[in-house]
Structure formats: structure tokens, C-alpha cells
Amino acid sequence: MILLLDLCYERETLSKYEFVYPIADTLKRAGARFEIQHFTQADERKQEEYSKIILCGTALKDNAYSKRLDLFSWLKTCEKPVLGICAGMQVIGSVFGGCMVSQMAIGLETLEILAATPLLGEPRQIQVYHLHNFGVTMPEGFLLAAGSAAFVKAFRHREKPIYGIIFHPEVRNRWVLERFLKL
Amino acid sequence: MEKNRVVCLITLVSDNIDSYMFHTPNIRWTVLQAQAMGIPLLSWPTKGQKEEELQDLKAAIAEAKIRYGIEGVVTGAIESVYQAARVQRICRDLDLWCFNPIWQINQVDYLQLLLSFGFEIIISGVFAYPLDESWLGAILTEDLILKLKVLEEKYLINPSGEGGELETFVIDGPPFKKRIEILKASIAYQNYRGHFQILDARLAEK
């Protein structure tokens, strides 16, 4: 069972249709079982029951999640595969010591994958869709997979299967989610 | 925003019927859709020139912010990164929320959802092979959705017309207090390109 964490500013928002359900649809079509929880409602004790965790993105104007980073401290001891998408990546980076920085990008971009990872595959260029006002600096203990120190676009933990991507894989790159299911 | 309330519709009326951004067939009849919903329509002209038309959209949304105090915009973008990214940028510039609740939805699922909610929708334009004259003015039904699904598999047609293959017009639905009755219409069609043009219509009791 996979946990999909909704990071939107409150439960049952219009944004959920845009940032959570497309991820859920990809998992459903891949035959994966999942549960959706809002990040303020997630039961830390129950997280042991999930095989993988995905932290979804939010609307451009929504950074309420960044005010409640205390709710994500469990990430530090998590051994399960975790994927942070956009806002989710910012959360992972912040919990592990990075800082959120103002960094706006909207629309398609050619992204260069710099290092091979089980999530993104071999180094190459791919077209990705960005929608964010903020990014995050490199946290300690992570490897840069795409972007630069000044504009981190993908990273992975050195020892654990914890990943962050600043782009939205639900747009044109659903294969990223399918690969995550196989980790 | 503690709740979402639709306070107005915004329509860009383009001089260019092949606008990159905006729907054009029967656009002047959105006034009846707004009346049917009991909310105002903000109708804004544009010459429909690529990229410049975005300034007109921005001006229209800015006017809606002043006139109706909108806090955000809801779009019907499904697949078009071109359209979605541009509306996102405008909303960011105007400090407004931008919601795209059908973004990336499966298009056949979406059409079926509309029928299940009780929307009544007509095909108002066709612009791709093999969509012929018989589609013009047709009411969207389960059978028609199945045909679109077949065309998606065979010809890569977007079932909801997201690629501009077809256009639609809503004449009834849950937000409508009255339904739109089409009194007179004409059809112009040639080589898999055609319009169902509404010439006269009125609101009628449901």
C-alpha cells in the first residue's frame, strides 16, 4: 500500500484535483494500491504500514506546508522509498537541512539528468513541466541528480531511497511514477 | 479562501477564429450561460494575435478582480501546457489563485463524468479528420463518447477536443437555473472543418 500525501493548504481543495488525483490516477492505472491523506491528518504511527510514500505538489500560491515542517520530521528516520514532487521536494530538502529559496519557474523546460539514479535512469535530457515559486538548497547527505547547486531540480539521499524532483511528473513524465513503484 | 464560490464568468471574444488561446465558436452566447447560472459575464474583446492576446486576458482578469473581487481563477485546461502555463503566469502576476481541477484527467472519463452530472452539451465545431458534418449540433451522448474513444485509438483525436479537433457548447447542467434553448442555427461544413452556429437562442424553464 502506497501513501499519497496531499500537501495542499487544507483538506478537499480544488487543488487536490490538480496535484493529487493525477498522481493517484497514474498509480491506479499501474495497478498499485494507495491511500490519500492530507498532511495535517497523516498518522505518523500508521506510516509503517505503507510500502512507499509520495509527497504531492501544491498550487503556485500555496506554501502552507512550509509553515508546518514539524509534521514531516518522521522523514529523518524513514527507511521506505519516498518521492517528493515540487512542494514535496522542498519539504524533504528542508527537513534534511536545506533552505527554501525563492525560485520561480512555470512551463516546459529541457532538463538535463546529470547522474544515473534508479528513479530517473541514465543521464540524458528530458522535457519537464515546472510550476513553482520556491525551490530548496541541497540538503546534507543528498546527491544532485539534476540542476545545479544554485537551482536544484532533482536529488536523492546518499543511502536511502528518498528522492526529490522539482518538476511535475504527472505532466508528460508519468514514467517517473511508474519507476518509483518498482523501487 | 475558506470556500469557493463562482462569482462571474470571463469570456474573451476574439476577432481571430483560429485563436491559440481562446474558444471562438458561439462565444457570444456565453451571455446566456451566465444568465442561466445567475452570475455576471465579463466579456472582453481581443484581436486574437498570438501572445498579444494574453495581455487582453490579463486585463480582463484584472478587471474581474476589481469589479467582482475575485480571489482566483478556475480554468478548464486538461492537457494544454501552452494554455495552462500562460494562465498560471497571469494569475501569479495578479496575485490570484489558479485552479485547474480537470488538469491531466482522462478525457473519456471526463466526458462520462459530465453526462453523469447531467450536463447537456452540443458539438459546435469540428476541425479534424474524420469528424464530418454529422457531428455538428449533435448532443453528446454515451454512444458519441464511445465513438470518440475509438477515434482516439485510431486517429489520436483528443476525445474532449483538447487539441482543437472539436468544440462544444453547454446548454444545460447542474449550475444552470434555466436551460438554453436553441431556436435557430446554421451549419457550415467543408473538408472536415465545420461550425454549428447558433443564430438565435433563449433561456427556458427546465
Image (spheres, rainbow, N blue to C red):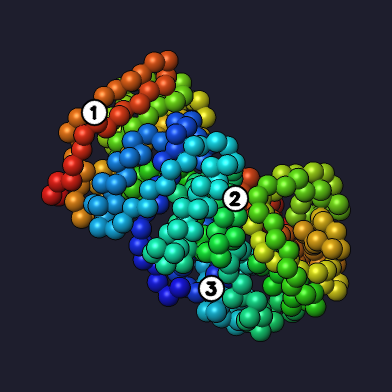
Residue receiving disc 2 = B85
Q: Residue type at mark 1?
A: Ala
Q: Name which residue lies at 13% across and 49% down.
A: B205
**Quadrant of the drawing holding the C terminus of chain A:** bottom right
Residue A51 visible in rendering: no
Measured Cα–Cα span from mark 1 to mark 2: 35 Å
Camera-nearest label, 3 or 2: 2
Q: Is residue B57 left or right of residue A3?
A: left
> Looking at the image, is mark 1 or mark 2 earlier in the sequence?
2
Q: Where does residue A160 sit, x and y in percent of width and height?
A: 79, 68
Measured Cα–Cα span from mark 1 to mark 3: 46 Å
Q: Is residue A19 left or right of residue B34?
A: right
Q: Residue type at mark 3?
A: Tyr
Q: Residue type at mark 2?
A: Ala
Q: Where does residue A180 sit, x and y in percent of width and height?
A: 69, 56
Q: Are marks 3 and 2 on the same chain?
A: no
Furthest residue in direction left, as rendered: B205
Measured Cα–Cα span from mark 3 to mark 2: 21 Å
Q: Where does residue A129 sit, x and y in percent of width and height?
A: 66, 50
Residue B185: mark: 1
Q: Name which residue lies at 46% across and 67% down.
A: B71
Contact? badges 1 and 2 (CB < 8 Å): no
Residue A9: mark: 3
Camera-nearest label, 1 or 3: 1
Q: Residues within 10 Å of mark 2 (few under 14, many from 20)?
A: some
Residue B123 visible in rendering: yes
The subunit carrying tag 3 is: A
Q: Residues within 10 Å of mark 3 (few under 14, many from 20)?
A: many
Instruction: Report which quarter residue A74 is drawn in.
Output: bottom right
Q: Are marks 1 and 2 on the same chain?
A: yes
- Using the image, determine if residue B186 lies above or below residue A7: above
